């Protein structure tokens, strides 16, 4: 019988445990951080069993938003992804993998619940850990996965955003992250779905990537009017010019870079995202 292996970034786990020593509903905040880390891992396995009990583990199943982890204690939640990371810590669980499963290793990421973040704050330690993971990634797969985890953490903290789909494949497109947007969100006047796409290339992204992503937002049968395109190494001038060319439409794209993400440590989540959208609207 084969058992499931959790793959995780230890600084991310340490950040979640550290947060629980100060806030949230963890039952004994006087425990050491090491003890809380073990408790977080144990509670994460329980959450996984609740979400996936009786289901053969496959990539499509793990990629559906409604089954993504959940709250461990008030303050910290977990999210599962279908692929393990080569250079991450591995944790053997007692969860027996069912016959018919195609996934034996699952990545887990811990993040703050939306209620723990005001419009102007992100957890600095967790953000630092995720930034370090992006900047230390070597392979193309690790670069893409680490940036997607960071984006998932950032946008899951936006008031009113709820992760709906990850790595969503349509007949003609693939979308990294899709969030549902509620009426009381940070962007209340935008439509039901907010799309997020990540590019962790060695060079800046240009016009072609901007055009393709804007089309993805527009091709959602009128249910989406806002997207965020995160290019870790920034944008070329041609991408900015394309934004001007499309400024008469009803689609707004927030262009973000790695420097914008780092600026959240000082200026806060809401200020950076609102500025990115305003820059596109008034370009």
Image (cartoon, grey):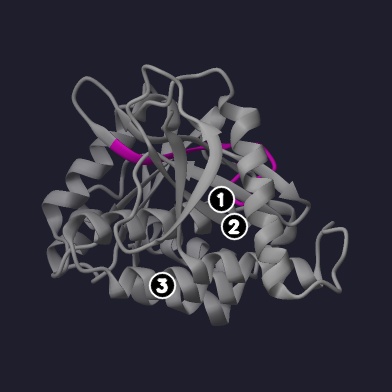
Residue identified by numbered label 2: 111
Q: Earlier in the sequence, mark 1 or mark 3?
A: 3
In which quarter of the view is residue 268 placed?
bottom right
Residue 22 in view in this figure: yes
Mark 3, other Cα within 10 Å: few <14 / some 14–19 / many ≥20: some
Residue 159 in view in this figure: no
Badge number at residue 198: none
In reply to whether residue 36 is colored magenta, the answer given is: no
Disc 1 and disc 2: Cα gap in Å?
A: 8 Å
Q: Residue at x 70, y 45 (%)?
A: 71
Q: Earlier in the sequence, mark 2 or mark 3?
A: 2
Badge number at residue 131: 3
Q: Residue at x 22, y 30 (%)?
A: 173
Q: Which residues are magenta?
A: 175-188
Pick the residue in front: 145 or 9: 9
Element type at marker 2?
A: strand
Task: Say which quadrant the N terminus sits in.
Answer: top left
C-beta proximity under 8 Å, tags 1 and 3: no
The residue mark sitting in front, 1 or 3, is: 3
C-beta proximity under 8 Å, tags 1 and 2: yes
Mark 1, other Cα within 10 Å: few <14 / some 14–19 / many ≥20: some
Disc 1 and disc 3: Cα gap in Å?
A: 16 Å
Badge number at residue 156: 1
Pick the residue in front: 50 or 192: 50
The residue mark sitting in front, 1 or 2, is: 2
How many tags in the picture?
3
Q: Residue at x 14, y 69 (%)?
A: 202
Pick the residue in front: 183 or 46: 46
Element type at marker 1?
A: helix
């Amino acid at each position: 019988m084969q058992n499931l292996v959790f793959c995780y970034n230890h600084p991310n786990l340490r950040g979640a445990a550290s947060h629980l020593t100060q806030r949230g509903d963890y039952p004994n905040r006087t425990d050491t951080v090491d003890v809380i880390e073990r408790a977080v891992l144990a509670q994460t396995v329980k959450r996984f069993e609740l979400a996936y009990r009786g289901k053969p583990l496959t990539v499509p199943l793990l990629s559906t938003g409604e089954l993504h982890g959940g709250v461990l204690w008030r303050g910290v939640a977990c999210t599962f992804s279908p692929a393990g990371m080569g250079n991450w810590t591995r944790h053997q669980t007692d969860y027996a993998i069912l016959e018919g499963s195609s996934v034996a290793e699952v990545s887990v990421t811990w993040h703050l619940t939306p209620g723990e973040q005001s419009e102007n704050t992100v957890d600095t330690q967790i953000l630092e850990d995720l930034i370090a993971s992006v900047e230390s990634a070597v392979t193309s797969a690790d670069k893409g996965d680490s940036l997607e985890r960071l984006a998932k953490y950032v946008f899951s903290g936006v008031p009113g955003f709820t992760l709906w789909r990850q790595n969503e494949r349509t007949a003609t497109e693939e979308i990294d992250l899709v969030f549902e947007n509620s009426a009381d969100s940070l962007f209340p006047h935008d439509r039901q779905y907010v799309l997020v796409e990540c590019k962790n290339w060695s060079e800046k992204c240009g016009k072609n990537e901007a055009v393709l992503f804007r089309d993805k937002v527009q091709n959602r049968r009128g249910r989406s009017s806002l997207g965020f395109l995160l290019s870790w190494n920034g944008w070329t001038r041609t991408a900015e010019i394309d934004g001007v060319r499309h400024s008469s439409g009803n689609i707004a794209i927030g262009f973000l870079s790695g420097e914008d993400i780092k600026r959240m440590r000082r200026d806060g989540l809401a200020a950076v995202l609102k500025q990115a959208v305003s820059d596109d609207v008034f370009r």
